[in-house]
Amino acid sequence: MAEITLQLLMLQLLTGLALGAVYALLAIGLSLIFGMLTVVNFAHGAFFMVGAFLGVYFLTVTGSFWFSLVLTPTAVGAIGLLCERFLVRPLYGRGIDYPLLLTFGLSYVMVEAMRVIFGIDGVPTSTPSELRGVVNVGFGMFPLYRLFLIAATAVIVLALWLFIEKTRYGLIIRAGSRDNEIVRVLGIDISKIWLLVFGLGTAIAGLSGLLAAPTRAVNPEMGIPVLAESFVVTVVGGMGSLVGAVVAGLLVGVVFSMTSLFAPEYAELSIFVLMAVVLLVRPQGLFGKAGLMG
Amino acid sequence: MTQANPISSAIALIAQHRVAAVLIFLLLFPLIMPYEALALNILIFGLYAVGFNLLFGYTGLLSFGHAAFFGVGSYLTGITIVHFGLPWWLAIVAGTAASGVVGLLIGFLAIRTRGIYFSMVTLALGQIVYYAFYKAERWTGGENGLRGVTVEEINVFGLTLDFVNPLTKYYVLYVFVALALWLVSRILASPFGAVIESIRENENRTAACGYDVARAKLLIFTLSAVICGLAGALRALHLSIVPIDSLHYLLSGQAVMMCLLGGMGTFFGPFVGAAVFLYLEDVATSFTTHWMAIVGVVFMVFVLFFPKGIWGTLVQRWQRWNNHSVVTK
């Protein structure tokens, strides 16, 4: 192993943050949907995967990464809207396991749909030309695209925070996740809000798929480990907490990249061990409310 | 009254002797299947679904990590045969015991959580087992799976049986399944069986009645792992190899699908589900490679419209029809 220098550690930390940025986005989508609809979206990894495929597709069709950046979440969000309206909605009030089971079945269909459309081997990806190369970050050279990942996530999280904390719609979403019956009594059509939140959550999942695509292999099965990893982040951060999703996402990313530096063969295991430790010490997650866990 | 109805009394008889009913059916099962390999698969995965049903159907805990127990059962059976040269029956015991231990460990962590958290945590912990076995290439063969778990003939009480013959193999494995089913039926009929069902109905109230809910959950989690581990152990002997897929998340999902298709929380449901699932797979894969899309759609239809599954819906229809005819009389 090469000698471990402070410089190397800092670069690896930054790599971890870039990876964590994707995890944070995934967990935000998952948390948003759960906090509002109490639905655990087992198709979240599949929406991520579809986002990666559509991202590559739109990039080749339009030739512009920025167009793809707009079109992909829109398209994935639209699929999410349809799924909520026609598949998830009939199951409200039927027990918490049923929407979960339904989205699980949905993920099978989405994986197979991508196999039919794009083939079983997946599609090749490359970093968009505008974001290639490395930049000097003060303590070494770092890939520009990974910096972009961190920055893009920061912008999305900030926008989401402003939306939820400062707008009328955000107010309704916050109220609805506390007590949806009162919101209904106040004359607000909550099912429309639920529809929008599901669409928003899946759009963010699609966007994270697009953003992550250049850093990993795009194939129909890519969503499965991602689903497990986003659950780890959610359990570590605490379900329904946006702050928890961001902090835990970055933490998980850093733990993964640091373990791959010191003991590469344990990298995949490390984040699950982190989850096990959190479960032992603080079962509700770092930022979770104890009430949710019962 | 219903006493006069012969069908009702037949159903009552089957319900009363449920283990015998399943065993007689399974005894004749290979004769009605197109080929023995399918019958063997249904036998093994039926047991897997039965073990899963203990937790999902009867206790109301939805685990998405049961492939871990199935896979550990498979791998440990294989490893003890390949690397240690254990006799086949001792290897089955070793595999089953190992999944019990893993079940105890995972259960200890998972029961600290409730509801949907439980599903997420079991899924994530199942991934640990997957990666651990994937990386331990020297013992498990890694991505290629563990090869050479060959048992050609077995000696039972001085009798030598040809284990390569699928029908003989079926009836040897059948003995283990029979024992497991009897055990499951005993557990369900015991006071402990009533406790786990009351946890499903109302956990807080069960605790208020003075039952140690955490302990009961851990116990049923481990028992469920043991049954699934046995199913895995039998599969290692059946296939002669242990594929890495045995630990995969999709196999955990398969238990959920089989259980829900057949009818969760019923004794016969998991076998019905496993049979329908595997038969459907067998038929579908002969004309399309996109079998997963079909199973996904079928599963969603069941979640939306028949949440009680095939067996559960049939029983419900029968009861309703029966009550109706009693009223009109």
Image (spheres, grey):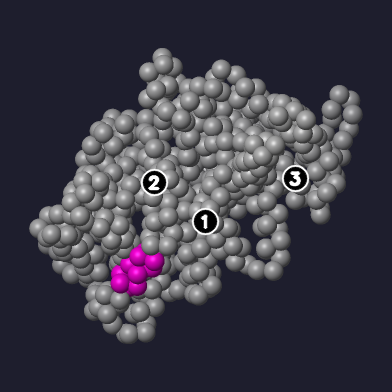
Q: Position of residue A149 (x, y in %)?
A: 24, 64
Q: Residue at x 56, y 32 (%)?
A: B54
Q: Which mark is residue A93?
A: 2
Q: Mark 2 or mark 3, which is nearer to you?
A: 2
Q: Are marks 1 and 2 in contact (CB under 8 Å)?
A: no
- Label 1 resides on the chain identified as B
Circle 3 Cα neighbour tier, 10 Å, few/some/many (<14 / 14–19 / ≥20): many
Q: Residue at x 72, y 26 (%)?
A: B16
Residue A158 appears anywhere in the view? no
Q: Which badge, 3 or 1, comes first in the chain's sequence?
A: 3
Q: Which mark is residue B122?
A: none
Q: Is residue B289 magenta?
A: no
Q: Position of residue A152 (x, y in %)?
A: 20, 65
Q: Secondary structure at mark 3?
A: helix
The amino acid type of the residue labelled 3 equals Leu
Q: Is residue B8 above or below residue A69?
A: above
Check the image and name the residue furthest to the left. A166
Magenta stretch prevailing secondary structure: helix
Q: Is residue A80 magenta?
A: yes
- Frontmost residue, A136 versus B228: B228
Instruction: State how far apart marks 1 and 2 are (Cα).
Output: 17 Å
- Label 2 resides on the chain identified as A
Residue with the mark numbered 1: B300
Q: Is residue B190 left or right of residue A58?
A: right
Circle 2 Cα neighbour tier, 10 Å, few/some/many (<14 / 14–19 / ≥20): few
Which quadrant of the rendered structure holds the C terminus of chain B?
top right
Instruction: State how far apart marks 3 and 1 are (Cα).
Output: 27 Å
Q: Residue at x 67, y 63 (%)?
A: B284
Q: Mark 3 or mark 1, which is nearer to you?
A: 1
Q: Secondary structure at mark 2?
A: loop
Which quadrant of the rendered structure holds the N terminus of chain B?
top right
Segment colored magenta:
A72-82
